[in-house]
Image (spheres, rainbow, N blue to C red):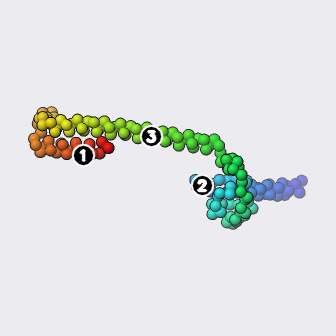
């Protein structure tokens, strides 16, 4: 019984050493990848953070022979298909959201353009233009007010009517 305990402790320590037999590198997106297999050939040596059995900096890996085209289509070690699909779905959803936002902005610009053109044509027609002031009273624009309003509308037209 006295000899069994030290042997169990020694076996546990040796077993823990096998857990350190992992590769660690940064992929093209800058994420850390852990694997029991070496990284793909397209990972530069400077991105390899840890090699099995080494305590210090990573050593260079001998270059693997060129793989056939079918192997390049196979998933890389350490890449989760489900995670990759979720990322693609999230990117597609974000792209759709961006497109919808751009379409909404285009509709708003077109509406602003149309309103500004209508208002400008009303001012340019020479008709008297009345505004309601902060007291709720109606007042007519004089020549300076008409000129300022015409310039403001022209600025809106220049910005929104492209």
Q: Pointer 2 and pointer 1: residues touching (CB < 8 Å)?
A: no
Q: How far apart are marks 2 and 1 (CA)?
A: 46 Å
What residue does disc 3 label? 99
Q: Quadrant of residue 43?
A: bottom right
Residue 28 percent coordinates (x, y): 60, 55
Residue found 32% across the figure and 37% down from its top:
110
Rate crowding at label 2 as few (under 14), some (14 to 19) or many (20 or more) other CA atoms within 10 Å.
few
What residue does disc 2 label? 28
User: Going by the image, does 25 lie left or right of 139?
Assistant: right
Residue 104 percent coordinates (x, y): 38, 37
Q: Of helix, strand and loop, which one carries label 1?
A: helix
Q: Distance between the residues labelled 1 and 3?
A: 27 Å
Q: Pointer 3 and pointer 2: residues touching (CB < 8 Å)?
A: no
Name the mark on residue 110.
none
Q: Between residues 49 and 106, which one lies in front from this camera angle? A: 106
Residue found 12% across the figure and 34% down from its top:
127
Q: Quadrant of residue 105?
A: top left
Q: Can residue 132 be seen in this view?
A: yes
With respect to residue 15, does 81 lie above or below?
Answer: above
Q: Distance between the residues labelled 3 and 2?
A: 27 Å
Q: Between residues 16 and 49, which one lies in front from this camera angle? A: 49
What residue does disc 1 label? 155
Q: Between residues 1 and 83, which one lies in front from this camera angle? A: 83
User: Going by the image, does 64 lie left or right of 84?
Assistant: right
User: Going by the image, does 113 lie left or right of 25?
Assistant: left
Q: Between residues 60 and 143, which one lies in front from this camera angle? A: 143
């Amino acid at each position: 019984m006295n000899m069994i305990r030290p042997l169990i402790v020694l076996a546990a320590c040796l077993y823990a050493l096998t857990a350190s037999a992992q590769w660690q590198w940064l992929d093209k997106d800058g994420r850390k990848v852990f694997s029991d297999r070496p990284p793909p050939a397209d990972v530069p040596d400077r991105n390899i953070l840890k090699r099995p059995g080494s305590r210090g900096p990573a050593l260079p890996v001998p270059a693997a022979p060129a793989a056939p085209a079918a192997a390049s289509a196979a998933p890389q070690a350490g890449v989760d298909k489900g995670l990759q699909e979720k990322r693609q779905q999230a990117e597609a959803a974000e792209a759709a959201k961006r497109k919808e936002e751009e379409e909404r902005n285009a509709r708003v610009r077109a509406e602003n353009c149309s309103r500004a053109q209508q208002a400008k044509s009303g001012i340019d027609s020479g008709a008297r233009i009345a505004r309601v002031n902060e007291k709720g009273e109606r007042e007519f624009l004089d020549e300076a007010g008409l000129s300022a309003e015409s310039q403001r509308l022209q600025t809106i037209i220049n910005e929104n009517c492209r």
